[in-house]
Amino acid sequence: MTPKRSFLDRVLPQSVGGQLLAMLLLALAITQGLGLILLTDERNRAVRAALGLEAAGRAANVALLLDDAPADLRAEILRAADSPLARFEVGPGPTAPHNSVDAAPFLDQIRQILGQPNREVLADIHALAVTPFAVPDNVPTAMRPMHQAMMAAHAEPIEMTLSIRLAGGDWLNVRTMFIRPGLQLSPQALLPLILMVLAVVLVAWATARRVVGPMRALAVGADRLGRGLDANPLPLTGPSEVRNTTYAFNRMQDRLTRFVSERTNMLAALSHDLRSPLTAMRLRIEMLDETEDSVRLKALVEEMQVMVEATLEFARGVAKTEPAATVDLSATLGDLVADAGGDRATLSRSSPVPATVRPHALNRALRNLIDNAVRYGGGAEVSLTKEPGFAVITVADKGPGLPEDQLEAVFEPFVRLEASRSRDTGGVGLGLAIARTIIQAHGGTIQLRNRTGGGLNAIVRLPVGGV
């Protein structure tokens, strides 16, 4: 069952370097985005305050003129003060309904210019909702691009209404409007961001290389160790955690290498010590008169010798002392099928599949599988296919198959596929154990499956990249 991957696992790169770069760029985008928002907000506040203070100063100066001017000049003063974005009127009451929360700076500005801290002044500031409209026909052609750009920027208009009580009791009402500037991204503003992104990419790449390089070497070393290849100790590089892990791996590799070497030497001595007394026993039995007891004793000694040889062969398969070489798996299977006999084993035609293996050990494993298919299934049908990075070898027979609960148990040492204890039919139960040990030492897998129409499939998946 494939484990469920989280959202981050699905969207982020799979490598450490890619994830580190993605995280740094995400953090950079978040910080730069927040910084841009805050900077834009502060800029808008500053521009709005400057425009509002300018309008408040004009209104205060007009109020001073109206206080000192005769009544018949007020109309001319108001006309002179009017502009497309500011309208000045005098009325009996204020048009500003109240003071807005952020109106205090404007009120202080007006009272300071008037020189009367207690003068009644109202300032209402609010945003206007403006529906986009088309550029009027009477706008000159040269100015149309500017108008279109302004409308495309979705500028936000701000309206400020000021009401100042005049000396005669009337109110000066001023309505002005200004635009809150939108977000402006110029090449000069984008250049620091681009330089920062490049700096983050370079730092992330250098950091990832320093971290990922030793980790990749550690993975390769572990794979080589698992396949039984001799390997030099890995260099201690990278961060302290990676160096500590590499140091622990080197120590483990040294201990395993010494253990395998000591075991191989022990097996060589054991082979000599066991064979010598068995050979002596066989010679003494040959010198005895042939009786029922001598014949039975001779059979028991021969069975012991076969079991000793099979056990030593199994142990040698675990030891993995043979050097690796590149062979064609198709040619290897062809030779094994020919050895088994054309009437008992067949090989499906396949293209050459080169693989780096331990040739004698792999031949022993595949021969055991073919011999089992011939012995228990009446014949072996061998096929070779290729998958990305793997060669798949299938040895099929047409025998009775196996109960599902025994498909894994038969790989254990001394477990036999048939119930009798005769060496002529069942061997000593080490063939599949030897085969699995050798295949796993190559970094591969072996599996038994019952065929739909009867019989058994032995499926071997072998890496073709080397052992």
Image (tube, rainbow, N blue to C red):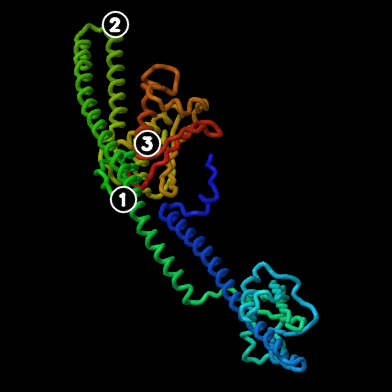
- Residue at 35% of width from left, 59% of height from top? 206
Residue corresponding to mark 1: 238
The amino acid pointed to by label 2 is Asp
187 or 357: which is nearer to us?
Answer: 187
- Image side of residue 41 versus residue 218, left or right: right
- Element carrying mark 2: helix
Q: Which residue is mark 3?
A: 440
Foreground residue among 348 and 51: 51
Quick one: label 1, few (<14), some, or many (20+) residues within 10 Å? some
Query: Which mark lies nearer to you, 2 or 3?
Result: 3
Q: Amino acid at mark 1?
A: Gly
Kind of residue indicated by mark 3: Gln
Residue 411 percent location from the top left of the image: 41, 28
Q: Nearer the viewer, mark 1 or mark 2?
A: 1
Residue visible at 70% across and 70% down? 99
Image spot of residue 280 (x, y percent): 19, 14
Which of pointers 3 and 1 indicates the residue nearer the eye? 1
